């Protein structure tokens, strides 16, 4: 937002490419990313239905992974229960659509607001816990959330089977039910998220979170209210995850507790670290590795997680900072 | 009252098992400040190795067979623990702490799915009648021989570990390394050996816990490591992670809470009660029941 006043502007970063003095909005990686995104628009034109679905799913999971990165990679809080916010978004849309007959688009704001509030409410008491203890508390939230879904709280969640037949969104009476329409919707949401994160990186908030992560004490002496900013980071991450959740519910036209269990949170957590904390290309690369590659190798389902486990260990041992870490000089 | 007593016995049995597994989490955390997410799966590996011996019929008498099963589980899992430390954690000791956490999660996936590839994804049933059946009944409460063995066995192992850590030279070295690795190294302690031994002793105890689970519930499945591992991990946190008596207390407490929740509230909410208790304790006493109240290091 106010990139020209950037403290880091004087430091040329490897990620920013050449040693250009003032930081421009359209850095080389940003341009490359925009071109890749535009190329992605061609997916429904050249590839078959399976791939269109995989690309749409990638977009949804990329949004959740980027939202996890806000909390984990940018604000430095070990959130291992992020699937809760993804799940609440999906369930709010499914419940409002199926049990109360709301149109899909009308459920969007409710889903996002519910996820945001839940993120803030759950985070408020625990943000003062130290790293590992916060991690444990978020695992607890995830477990309780899944139990609540399984036990059919309020008689609206459909229990262990979940809910089926979530409708397709329609805009001005124009249904978006086809696979390609769904893809374009998710691809746009993906672009919106990238734009948001790109701006967050350069904003006051992004900078504050970054320095809070680096040194809480120093940030505190400069007048940063650590607790408030951490809750804010959680709320923002939850809002985006909730948004991804509504997209997920529409794309799959079903929700079930199995999609939001602790293992999913672990996968999201791993995506950020395997890819690279606070790095957009890193997180997207992580998403491809953890969500898209498994879709491609469905035939080897049995060996999938076995190989995954080895890959996670090998990548961390060889590149502890992640595959594509954020550039050293690219501090916001 | 009958239900209460019965659930107390059940809770103590399960609690003993949790405590045994929790010790592995807490010992590793104490020395390395690392949550070893693969520990639950290592424990389950112990149950599977034990099952192989039990179904082989080696050794003649059934009691001897059970003893052999425990020995095999302890040896295999102890070695696996050391191998894990060497390959997955040692190279990351100087790296960002989260890198080791992801490596641990990877190791967990590897072991869990390795078990599935070797022994299959289906539930494996333990053979029956391995131990002489015996039970005592009083006041409408029943305790059988296996429960006595589990409670007694875990108590004995915990006592031995406590004595080892607090009354031997090597135990003193372990405690020193837990407090300050650099200072310990200056005092001539081989910290690497301490860490390796922690990764042998912890998983070995976990393997015994895992085999107890198999014998008690008479079945094992490959994803079991998450369920029991998570409970044992909670037990370690409840007691104060890094603190050995804390893990014991946490395990027994968690076992009892689980049993009472199942007996008096509802078993479908059992997990939620466990986690609610955990979060409540974290908020009131972040370092656990027996954890020291340390000032935040800056």
Image: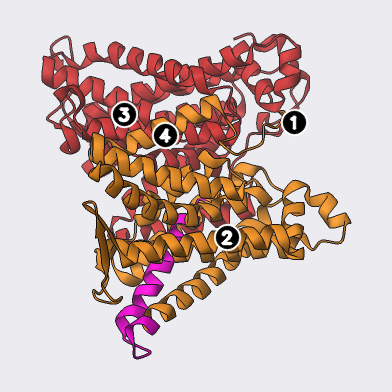
Contact (Cβ within 8 Å) of mark 4 with mark 2: no
Which residue is farthest front? B139
Which chain is displayed in red in the rendered image?
Answer: A
Residue count near mark 3 (Cα–Cα under 10 Å), binned few <14, some 14–19, many ≥20: many
Q: Magenta region: which residues?
A: B37-64
Are dots 1 and 2 on a single chain?
yes
Residue positioned 26% across, 66% down in the render: B135
Would residue A36 be counted in the magenta stretch?
Answer: no
Question: Foreground residue, A292 or B75?
Answer: B75
Secondary element under disc 3, as helix, strand or loop, is helix
Closer to the eye: label 4 or 2: 2
Can you say which quadrant of the picture contains the C terminus of chain A?
top right
Which mark is on residue A87? 3
Secondary element under disc 4, as helix, strand or loop, is helix
- The vertical placement of B119 against B54, above or below, is above
Are dots 3 and 1 on a single chain?
no
Residue B111 visible in this rendered orientation of the protein: no
Chain for mark 1? B
Contact (Cβ within 8 Å) of mark 3 with mark 4: no
Disc 3/disc 1 C-alpha distance (Å): 36 Å
Colour chain B is painted in: orange
Task: Give the prevailing secondary structure in the magenta stretch.
Answer: helix
Residue count near mark 1 (Cα–Cα under 10 Å), binned few <14, some 14–19, many ≥20: few
Secondary element under disc 1, as helix, strand or loop, is loop
Residue that numbered label 1 is attached to: B297
- The vertical placement of B99 against A30, above or below, is below
Residue that numbered label 4 is attached to: A140
Chain for mark 2? B
């Amino acid at each position: 937002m106010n990139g020209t006043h950037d403290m880091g502007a004087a430091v040329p970063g490897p990620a920013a490419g050449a040693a250009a003095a003032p930081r421009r909005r359209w850095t080389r990686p940003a341009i490359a990313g925009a071109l890749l995104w535009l190329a992605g628009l061609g997916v429904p034109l050249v590839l078959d239905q399976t791939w269109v679905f995989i690309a749409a799913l990638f977009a949804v999971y990329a949004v959740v992974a980027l939202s996890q990165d806000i909390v984990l990679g940018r604000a430095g809080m070990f959130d291992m229960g992020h699937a809760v916010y993804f799940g609440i978004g999906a369930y709010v849309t499914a419940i409002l659509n199926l049990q109360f007959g709301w149109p899909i688009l009308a459920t969007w704001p409710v889903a996002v607001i519910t996820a945001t509030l839940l993120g803030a409410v759950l985070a408020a008491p625990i943000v003062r816990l130290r790293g590992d203890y916060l991690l444990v508390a978020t695992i607890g939230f995830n477990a309780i959330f899944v139990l609540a879904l399984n036990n059919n709280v309020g008689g609206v969640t459909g229990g262990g089977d979940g809910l089926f037949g979530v409708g397709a969104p329609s805009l001005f009476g124009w249904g978006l039910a086809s696979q390609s329409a769904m893809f374009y919707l998710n691809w746009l949401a993906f672009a919106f998220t990238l734009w948001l994160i790109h701006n967050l990186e350069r904003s006051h908030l992004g900078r504050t979170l970054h320095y809070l992560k680096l040194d809480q004490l120093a940030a505190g002496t400069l007048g940063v209210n650590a607790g408030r900013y951490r809750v804010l980071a959680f709320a923002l991450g939850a809002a985006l995850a909730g948004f991804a959740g509504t997209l997920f519910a529409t794309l799959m036209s079903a929700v079930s507790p199995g999609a939001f269990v602790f293992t999913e949170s672990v996968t999201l957590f791993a995506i950020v670290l395997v890819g690279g904390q606070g790095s957009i290309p890193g997180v997207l690369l992580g998403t491809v590795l953890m969500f898209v590659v498994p879709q491609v190798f469905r035939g080897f389902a049995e060996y999938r997680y076995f190989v995954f486990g080895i890959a996670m260990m090998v990548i961390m041992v060889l590149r502890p900072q992640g595959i594509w870490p954020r550039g050293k000089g690219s501090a916001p | 009252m009958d239900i209460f007593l019965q659930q107390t016995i059940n809770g103590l049995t399960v609690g003993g098992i949790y405590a045994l597994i929790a010790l592995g989490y807490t010992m590793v955390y104490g020395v390395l400040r690392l949550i070893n997410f693969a520990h639950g799966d290592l424990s389950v590996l112990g149950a599977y190795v034990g099952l192989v011996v039990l179904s082989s019929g080696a050794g003649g008498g059934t009691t001897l067979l059970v003893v052999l099963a425990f020995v095999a589980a302890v040896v295999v899992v102890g070695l696996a623990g050391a191998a894990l430390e060497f390959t997955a954690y040692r190279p990351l000791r100087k790296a960002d702490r989260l890198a080791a956490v992801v490596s641990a999660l990877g190791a967990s996936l590897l072991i869990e799915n390795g078990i599935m590839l070797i022994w299959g994804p289906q539930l494996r049933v333990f053979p029956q009648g391995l131990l002489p059946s015996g039970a005592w009944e009083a006041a409408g409460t029943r305790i059988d021989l296996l429960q006595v063995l589990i409670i007694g066995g875990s108590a004995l192992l915990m006592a031995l570990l406590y004595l080892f850590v607090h009354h031997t030279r090597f135990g003193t070295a372990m405690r020193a390394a837990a407090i300050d690795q650099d200072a310990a190294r200056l005092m001539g302690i081989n910290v690497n050996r301490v860490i390796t031994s922690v990764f042998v002793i912890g998983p070995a105890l976990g393997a015994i816990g895992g085999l107890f689970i198999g014998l008690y519930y008479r079945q094992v499945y490959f994803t079991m490591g998450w369920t029991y591992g998570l409970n044992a991990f909670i037990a370690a946190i409840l007691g104060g992670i890094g603190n050995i008596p804390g893990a014991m207390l946490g395990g027994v407490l968690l076992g009892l809470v689980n049993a009472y929740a199942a007996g008096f509230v509802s078993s479908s909410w059992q997990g939620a009660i466990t986690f609610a208790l955990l979060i409540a304790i974290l908020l009131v006493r972040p370092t656990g029941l027996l954890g020291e109240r340390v000032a935040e290091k800056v």
